């Protein structure tokens, strides 16, 4: 089974995009800044009268799509874990923070960071791409 995903700048627009025009009207607002930032960010902004050059179709099997999503989730969990480690390091070297506050907070940051890294690894293993990520 193959799922077809078609990305077009108008396809992901918020329903309120047409708020300035009556329902069914061909009049569209000239300001295209409300378009989703994940759609066609490599293209120059268009005016309302311009037609898209080409619509790109990406085909994914469900397994490929799951691996793609799992890779993104695991990456984001890893980024958050790294940020928590940096926050813990900052607290450790910061002499201005009271010791009574530093200890429990550093321990919590490091504990949550470890849990997030384990969760990211589990996400990759569940999707069957842990071997690819290790390379």
Image: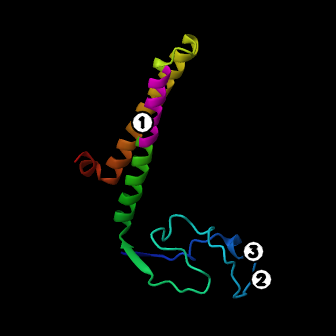
Image point (51%, 77%), residue name: 8
Q: Which residue is mark 3?
A: 19
State the CA–CA distance, disc 3 to disc 1.
41 Å
Q: Which residue is mark 2?
A: 22
Which range of residues does the magenta coloring cover?
Answer: 79-91
Per the rendering, the mark at residue 82 is: 1
Question: Do the CB atoms of the residues marked 2 and 3 lie less than 8 Å apart?
Answer: no
Image quarter in which the N terminus is found = bottom left
User: What percent of the width, then of the height, locates residue 30?
Assistant: 67, 78
Q: Earlier in the sequence, mark 3 or mark 1?
A: 3
**Disc 2 versus disc 3: distance between alpha carbons?**
7 Å
The crowd level at tag 3 (other Cα within 10 Å; few <14, some 14-19, many 20+) is few
Identify which residue is drawn at 46% across, 40% down.
80
Is 131 placed left or right of 24 in the picture?
left
| Residue 65 position in % (x across, y down) | 39, 64
**Secondary structure mostly taken by the magenta-highlighted segment of the chain:** helix
Marks 2/1: CA–CA distance: 48 Å
Q: Is residue 49 above or below residue 92?
A: below
Which is more N-terminal, label 1 or label 2?
A: 2
Res 50 quadrant in image = bottom right
């Amino acid at each position: 089974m193959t799922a077809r995903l078609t990305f077009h700048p108008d396809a992901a627009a918020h329903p309120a995009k047409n708020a300035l025009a009556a329902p069914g009207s061909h009049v569209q607002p000239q300001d295209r800044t409300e378009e989703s930032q994940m759609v066609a960010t490599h293209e120059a902004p268009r005016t309302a009268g311009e037609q898209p050059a080409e619509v790109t179709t990406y085909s994914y099997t469900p397994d490929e799509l799951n691996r793609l999503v799992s890779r993104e989730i695991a990456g984001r969990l890893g980024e958050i874990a790294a940020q928590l480690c940096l926050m813990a390091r900052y607290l450790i070297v910061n002499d201005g923070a009271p010791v009574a506050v530093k200890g429990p907070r550093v321990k919590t940051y490091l504990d949550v960071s470890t849990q997030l890294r384990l969760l990211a690894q589990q996400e990759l293993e569940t999707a069957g791409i842990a071997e690819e990520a290790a390379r």
